Amino acid sequence: MKKLILASAVSIAMAGAAQANEHSGTYAFDTKGAHQFITFKISHLGYSWLYGRFNDFDGEFTYDADNPGNSTVSVTVDTTSLDSNHAERDKHLRSDDFLHVDRYPEASFTSKRVEVDSEGEADIIGDLTLHGVTKEVTLDVEMVGHGPDPWGNYRMGFAAGTTFKLDDFGISYEKIGEVSREVELIISVEGIRQ
């Protein structure tokens, strides 16, 4: 489900332009507090689900409350930080059968445009670079919330997701079979306004 909950856009219409810019700005991912996750889900031979995550990543987003379509996001992921809760499997997933982290230690996403419809649903379209291959993907996005925190900062959080095929990024390990070639990526980030 693709919801950019633009409660902010509703409040802009109701409360006027003065509040519109209250939460606009550039937000750095909260890496220090680790209020962020990039997780993935993929079928294991069609018999179960394998879940994992990337422990190290960073990025920032800009949010334009007056025109959410002008918002941007960029993310950089340390692929060597892959963690599926099993050391031997992690070693295999990092190998040249899959992510080949010795050659491609970084993945990234850079937005190109944000499409918001009249119901406040949004897609972020951008370039995902993984395994040395760059492809356009679409993230379904939901604004989780925004506001001041107890430490004097202003925060905003988003959840996003997309699905892509490993083959599209040159990952074609034959033993996994057809049912294990599609990855669901789930992203949750909390940014601190700079």
Image: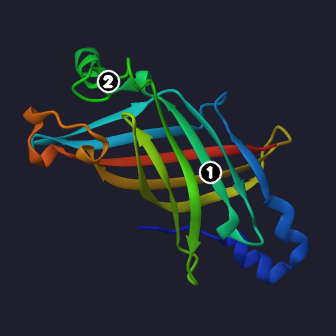
- Residue nearer the viewer, 15 or 187: 187
Q: Is residue 11 left or right of residue 124?
A: right
Question: Measuring 65% from the left and 30% from the top, which residue is drawn there?
Answer: 33
In the rendering, which numbered label is found on residue 100? 2
Q: Earlier in the sequence, mark 2 or mark 1?
A: 1
Q: State the image coordinates of residue 15 (x, y, percent, origin top left).
A: 84, 79
Q: State the image coordinates of residue 193 (x, y, percent, origin top left).
A: 78, 46
Q: Real-space Cα distance between discs 2 and 1?
A: 26 Å
For the N terminus, the image quarter is bottom left
**Label 1 secondary element:** strand
Local crowd at mark 2 within 10 Å, few (<14), some, or many (≥20)?
A: some
Instruction: Return the residue at label 1.
Output: 73
Q: Is residue 48 left or right of residue 76?
A: left
Question: Measuring 67% from the left and 36% from the top, which residue is drawn there?
Answer: 30
- Numbered disc total: 2
- Residue 113 in which image quadrant: bottom right
Q: How is the image coloured?
A: rainbow
Question: Measuring 37% from the left and 22% from the top, which residue is drawn there?
Answer: 101
